[in-house]
Image: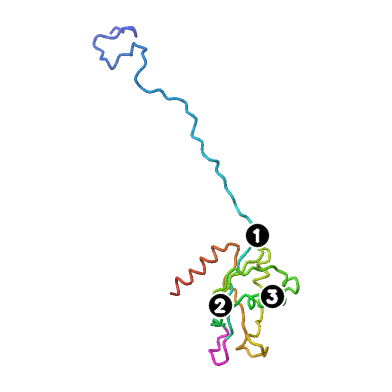
Amino acid sequence: MTSNPPDKPSPDAMDIDQQPTTTEPTNKPHKRNRPAPRRPPTTTLTLRSPPFAYAHLQLVTPPTSTEAPNPAVSEQPALLDNLQLRSYLTAALRQFLGDTGAAIPLDILLLRGASAWVRVPREDLAAFAAAVTAFEGLASGNDPSSDPAGLMLLRVMACGDWLGALVGRDEEGVLWTG
């Protein structure tokens, strides 16, 4: 078998097997080096310590002696107002932490029936929740008698750094109880 030089195709070679002999440009479009499209810079933000914390409070009263002997508190049908809530919270903080506790800034965000939403500085949330939980309550009427039926208490339903999570948790209870 004789080999043909690369310039000369063999007589039985097909057109596909042959090297192109022309240097003319093909009809394929040329790729241009285009710069990548500019994207806006990605910015991330992490809130490590929010300045405020939130608490959901509920006004309750202890059961009377005619009710079941369970020492749990029952819900109070009375409504809260801003002044009443402020006096309860101030008394609870003063009893727990003295004048320093009474000086903790509080913002009443919402009052709805016997429920209240309060905003406190984040670093004071633990002391606030402990003060409200440990508070013995105030007499509901003008007569500060020792009758437990007239005693009003605040119960901490939920507290945390993120208001959205607390509101969602509150509405979750409504979902399951009807």
Q: Which residue is mark 3?
A: 90
Residue at screen point 72% across, 77% down: 95
Residue at the far left: name it: 12
| In this picture, residue 47 sits left or right of residue 38 | right
**Residue 29: % across, % down:** 38, 23
Q: Is residue 20 shown in magenta?
A: no
Q: In the image, what residue type sits under mark 2? A: Ala
Q: Magenta region: which residues?
A: 63-71
**Residue 19: % across, % down:** 33, 13
Q: In the image, what residue type sits under mark 1? A: Pro
Residue at the far right: name it: 99
**Residue 22: % across, % down:** 34, 11
Judged by its main secondary structure, the magenta piece is loop
User: Which quadrant, please, contains the C terminus?
Assistant: bottom left
Q: CA distance from mark 3 to mark 2?
A: 18 Å
Q: Which residue is mark 1?
A: 51
Q: CA distance from mark 3 to mark 1?
A: 21 Å
Q: Which mark is residue 114?
A: 2
